[in-house]
Amino acid sequence: MDDIPYPVRINRYLLLMGYCSRRKADELIAKGEVSINGKVAELGSIVQRKDTVSVSKNIAALPHTYTYFAYNKPRGIVSHNPQKGERAVEDVSGLGKNVSPVGRLDKESRGLMLLTNDGRIVDSLLNPKYEHEKEYRVTVDKKNSNWFLRHMESGVDIEGYVTKPAKIKKKSDTTFALILTEGKRHQIRRMCAALGYQVRDLKRVRIGDIKLARLKEGDVRELTEKERASLFA
């Protein structure tokens, strides 16, 4: 899958691919049943985008119950590859390591994240060709000019890549709602910086049909049946 956040640990890779839980992946790796490019993987091995991962033919894909959660990530929590001393989503959400975040939300940003053990939804939610909307509330360091809002809406050149057209609505002199259908690394911060603005607060409030609504910061809730169905629409 192009949108798995490479490089990624082998146990998380198997989880995101929908093969098994992280715990079961660790068991298979410890038994020597998992290989990367033909070499037996070790616990903690890293998978790169170009790598080929295989599981012993003697091991059948392991059916398990899929779970889906909405999480209101606070600022300061890391969604991917935490460094020493950093707190990761899996550590603070109360759900443990058998679910993983779908996509990223950088350390200084907050708001809605989806957590699941179902790798089937990763590509459909993250691949820009499916144009799933993600809505944000953005506060910047100075007054939103018409010029700034117009460029944020039509597309911004960030290091040679022009962002796709977005939807934008002014909320106050320094705050606006922004709806994207793609998710480049630090995209909104880079878009604003390219136009001479700095982001003071960035909060994701919606992913597709799933809304943050009144979910308190740091809290988790299971997705409703309707929300789960929307992931496969």
Image (spheres, grey):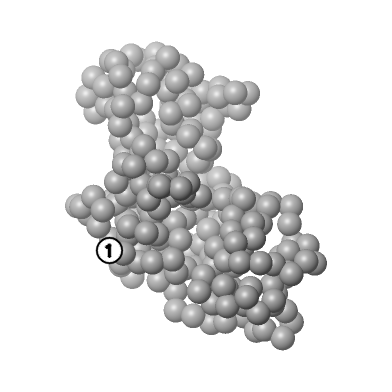
| x 26%, y 53%: residue | 218
- Residue 42, compared with residue 107, is above or below; it is below
Which residue occupies the foreground of this view, 183 or 149? 183
Tell me residue 187's x, y (percent): 48, 33
* Left or right of 42 on screen, residue 87: left
Q: Using the rendered view, name the quadrant where residue 24 is placed.
A: bottom right
Tell me residue 135's x, y (percent): 36, 41
How many marks the image carries: the answer is 1
Asked if one can make out residue 17 in the rendered structure from this viewpoint, the answer is no
Residue under pointer 1: 221
Q: In the orientation shown, which residue stands out farthest toward the right? A: 38
* Left or right of 116 on screen, residue 93: left
- Residue 120, compared with residue 20, is above or below; it is above
* Left or right of 27 on screen, residue 118: left
| x 40%, y 53%: residue | 88
| x 51%, y 70%: residue | 22
Q: Residues within 10 Å of mark 1 (few under 14, many from 20)?
A: some
Identify which amino acid the numbered label 1 is placed on: Arg
Q: Using the rendered view, name the quadrant where residue 56 is placed.
A: bottom right
Q: Secondary structure at mark 1?
A: strand
Tell me residue 188's x, y (percent): 44, 31
Q: Which part of the image, by quadrant, shows the N terminus?
A: bottom right
Asked if one can make out residue 42 in the rendered structure from this viewpoint, the answer is yes
